[in-house]
């Protein structure tokens, strides 16, 4: 049985900002419906740090979110309207 490195386990529990639903994004601290929609509209992100480019997410909130999120390649096209 392969053992995962602790950082791999932590990464698996992070919310993927390129694929998460609005509800998933709203579960993050400081993210309400409007910011969740803004994150979805700004996809795709190439890194978790890029979430700071979303209007309404300043340096403090961006720093708070970084350990809780990841940005896998691609984005959910179902969220595009």
Image (cartoon, rainbow, N blue to C red):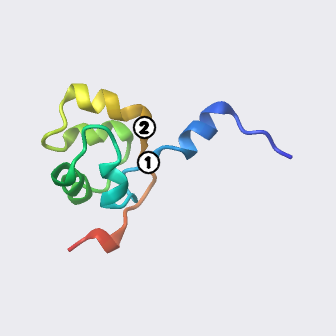
Instruction: Answer with left or right where residue 44 lies relative to residue 81.
Output: right
Residue 58 sits in quarter? top left
Residue at the right extreme of this rendering: 1
Vertical side of 17 occupied by 65: above or below: above
Instruction: Answer with left or right where residue 70 lies relative to residue 8.
Output: left
Q: Secondary structure at mark 2?
A: helix
Q: Residue at x 29, y 69 (%)?
A: 79
Residue picked out by circle 2? 68
Instruction: Answer with left or right where residue 12 lies relative to residue 63.
Output: right
Task: Return the disc, 1 or 2, that comes first in the chain's sequence.
Answer: 1
Q: Position of residue 51 (x, y in %)?
A: 28, 42
Q: Nearer the viewer, residue 28 or 14?
A: 28
- Check contact, mark 1 vs mark 2: CB within 8 A: yes
Mark 1: give few (<14), some (14-19) or many (20+) Cα within 10 Å: many
Q: Residue at x 35, y 61 (%)?
A: 21
Q: Position of residue 4 (x, y in %)?
A: 72, 39
Residue picked out by circle 1? 15
Label 1 and label 2: CA atoms lie apart by 6 Å
Residue at the left extreme of this rendering: 55
Q: Residue at x 40, y 59 (%)?
A: 19
Q: Position of residue 43 (x, y in %)?
A: 28, 56
Residue 18 sits in quarter? bottom left
């Amino acid at each position: 049985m392969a053992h995962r490195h602790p950082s791999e386990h932590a990464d698996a529990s992070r919310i993927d900002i390129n694929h998460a639903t609005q509800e998933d994004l709203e579960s993050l601290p400081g993210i309400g419906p409007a910011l969740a929609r803004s994150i979805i509209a700004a996809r795709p992100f190439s890194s978790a740090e890029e979430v700071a480019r979303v209007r309404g997410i300043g340096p403090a909130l961006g720093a708070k979110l970084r350990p809780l999120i990841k940005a896998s390649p691609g984005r959910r096209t179902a969220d595009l309207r």
